[in-house]
Image (cartoon, coloured by chain):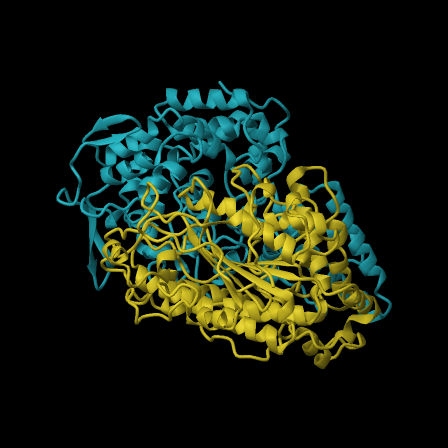
Chain colours: A cyan, B yellow
Amino acid sequence: MPPVYRGPFGKPQAERLLWRAGFGPRPGEAERLAKKGLEHAVHSLTHPGRERLRGPKPHDDNGHPLAPYDAWGHDQLWWLDRMVRTTRPLAERMTLVWHDWFATSEDASNARLMIRQNNLFRKHGLGSFLTLLTDVTCDPAMLLWLSGTDNSKDSPNENYGRELMELFTIGAGRGGYTERDVREQARALTGWRNDWSDNLGPTHFRFDKRRHDPGVKRIFGRRGHFDWRDSCRLCVQHRLHPSFFVTKIWSYFVPTPPPAATKRSLERLYVAHGHAIGPVVEAILKHPALYDGPRMVKPPAVYVAGLLRSLRRGIDTEAWTWLMDLAGQSLFFPPNVAGWDDTRWLDTSTYRARWLIASHAIRPHELNGDKAKLPADAAKLMTRAEAFFGKPVLTGRTHGELKRFARRALGDANARWKKEQYPALIENALRQLLASSPDLQTS
Amino acid sequence: MARCHHCDEFSRASFMRRTAAEAGRGLPAIEAGMPAPAGTGLDRRTFVARTFGLALSVYGAGKLNLFQEGIARAASGPAQPVLVSVFLPGGADSLSVLYPALDSRYRQLRPTLALGPGDGPQFTEDPSLYWHPSLAPFATLHGEGKVTVMPAVGYTHPDQSHFTSRHFWEVGATEPRLVTGWMGRYLDHAGARDNPLQGLSLDYQLQPSLASAKVPVAALAAPDEYTFDAPGVWGDVENRMLETLQPLGARRSDRFLNEAANATAQSDRLRRQLAPFTGSDYGTPVPYPDGDDGFPRQLAGLAAMLAAGLPLRCVAITAPGEYDTHSDQPKALADGLDITARSLLAFQRDLEARGLADRVLTLVWSEFGRRAEENGSDGTDHGAAGSAFLIGTRSKGQMVGEFPGVANLDDDGNLRATSDFRAVYSSLLEQWLGEDAAAVIPGAGSFQRPALVK
């Protein structure tokens, strides 16, 4: 079995676990989870019980309910709301993992089909990888995105066959397959089609054996009358698949590569459980590297959902769609079939987007210098700002710099009206700085 | 907006991206209903002026010094040559970009997709070839001697994965594990430690070719959007808040906390560099294409930044359009090339009007070309050799590598490369940027240097 973390499991560790395996704590949640200890804390995430959505119901800028199938961007808000309000954060986080792993873009289909695919990820998130892969392979949004319904006996299309091996199961440049395997996989995957309806767009997705190439294919050196199910099975049974799988799933939870021994034992665990996802994720969530290793940059969706959770704020504006786009993560619109690049979330452009996200998150609570009467005391103002976000764990340096800012800004108040108004302005600025600080960009 | 199944999904998506960008710009710096702060010396007029970045005086002496420093740094030393990299994402079909209209084999390979001799302008350097109709602006510039054409550029043992092949182009080597971009490594050698603008992604995210190991580089969609406002924060307190970004960006021991701190520090530096520019009218002297896409505006902003003397060296931008045309190729390719080529023509005219044309070369490239034989879904699958263009008044204007023809395809049925992207980079480094290519491109010594610059 892979090693298990044995160090102290207090608020900092519980907070990190909630960020990595979900979307961060609501106020008080990290403290409560810490009391359970590592074993029960992880178990509570992997076995959460029936889903309930807690907190204010989502609505658009006009106060109307979301229309995820019909209004642009509302599908993204619908999902963001699940992230914010769910009582099953890991299931929702796994949905985000699979959306990145099997990155499908709405550019090729529509919200209805994307949400259908999204529910598939939610359902199989911790189940059998072969079942998930097989269902994704004939999922309508994926069939449209990677030319699955364009792939027929008479005109094979390699798009899905290649990405199936390169990005979903085996990996490129490892000697796992040849260009011939790509072409033969394309033949095996032939047969899917759909109709077009003026109301629904692409519809009635089905396997049509007249479009399927029934001939013998040779894949990974094996011969047979393979079809799409065989394509998936052959990939999952490939000798290089377990190492691809555990390395890739690890990377969603821990930013440094797994130690060699850990990697081997995760592979064994994966194979021993018949390619089940859950046991591998559970082992990663208990691994010392998650708690002792470096922090991890939060993906934009996690950053946004987490801020809202910490503020107990529901979805009450459509602004999150364009803000997340600026930050580099439009849900349902991954940049390409490889998904988002988790090593490049932060640069000068996306940093500013995160600044804007923080502004929008705190805006409804903006303090008015004329009305709010706050103490002219840097330490007290800082304590209030921390409480505003549910007291997240901060590094000493960030805490010190923010307090120094408050002290200096109070020192600028050289007139009576400034002495009255600046504490509120400073509190507003502390919230902005705290939410966009390096500490809250990472977990 | 109601969902419309009949409209083009792609243009709808790019429309939304533009809306997003505008919404970002539209975030008000000054809150409605904010009290007029008596006694601050800042009345409503100066607040509004500052929103548009016009009245620098409201920043006070400290900020003015920064402004002057920025201009001083930019103005010191000779004007540097600038290289702009434009990436066509997805693998643009080189057999449509420049197509052998009268070759019967081409028409056999492309029974539905083949273009005819009357569709696009003839390519004067090789009259058997024709420009894609949407590339008429390139044909115009080529006629003026301002375009060097590489009709089949690639590398030996071509990889047909988007990600692997693009990675090779971005890092400037066929090395899967190299993590710095080729322009990033150039800047590591020749750049400055305090100038993020030297490597600029005109994008919402950093382009991999600019990934550096030592020096800072920047990503920004447009120069006038780079503001950091906070609700209910103004005056002295705002200045103090912005000053705090610098210490928050100081080095941290945790690797990824440090990455976040680094992004903070670089954003703060860029904010100070762009402060004089924020919200200003670009003063663009020529018309750019209208429409939903941000690309023309980004190029207009780039020309304006160069005209303002900002210290740019290498710039990377992704072209509009979707070039991974497994299906519906004719419209997708024509639309993407059209907005790209018209925008680049406007950019060239802008540079010429501003007297900057001799300082800028633009390289247009894609990760590969596409399969010679069409695939039966009105599209083409991944191929090998692609096309590239070097645009500018200093571009040599003579094609590099001949058109390989469709009679002698490789074993996968793809066009063979007649020039190597690493040789192109080596020439650009030596003939344009004045850097020894051996310091930047692994194995540079083994490549002939095509003449790219005049």
Picture quarter containing residue B280?
A: bottom right
Q: Position of residue B121 (x, y in %)?
A: 37, 71
Q: Position of residue A211 (x, y in %)?
A: 16, 45
Q: Residue at x 77, y 49 (%)?
A: A401
Q: Nearer the viewer, residue A82 or A53?
A: A82
Q: Residue at x 40, y 30 (%)?
A: A277
Q: Position of residue B110 (x, y in %)?
A: 26, 56
Q: Is residue A311 visible?
A: no
Q: Is residue A206 left or right of residue A293?
A: left
Q: Nearer the viewer, residue A274 or B286?
A: B286
Residue extending farthest top: A1
Q: Position of residue A185 (x, y in %)?
A: 28, 37
Q: Quadrant of the N terminus of chain B?
A: bottom left
Picture quarter containing residue A365?
A: bottom right
Picture quarter containing residue B240?
A: bottom right
Residue extending farthest left: A210
Q: Is residue A347 visible?
A: yes
Q: Residue at x 38, y 69 (%)?
A: B122
Q: Examine the rendered structure and indicate whether residue A5 appears above or below residue B432.
A: above
Q: Quadrant of the C terminus of chain B?
A: bottom right
Q: Nearer the viewer, residue B400 or B263?
A: B400
Q: Residue at x 76, y 43 (%)?
A: A397
Q: Is residue B75 left or right of residue B319?
A: right
Q: Is residue B441 left or right of residue A379?
A: left
All told, the count of numbered labels is 0
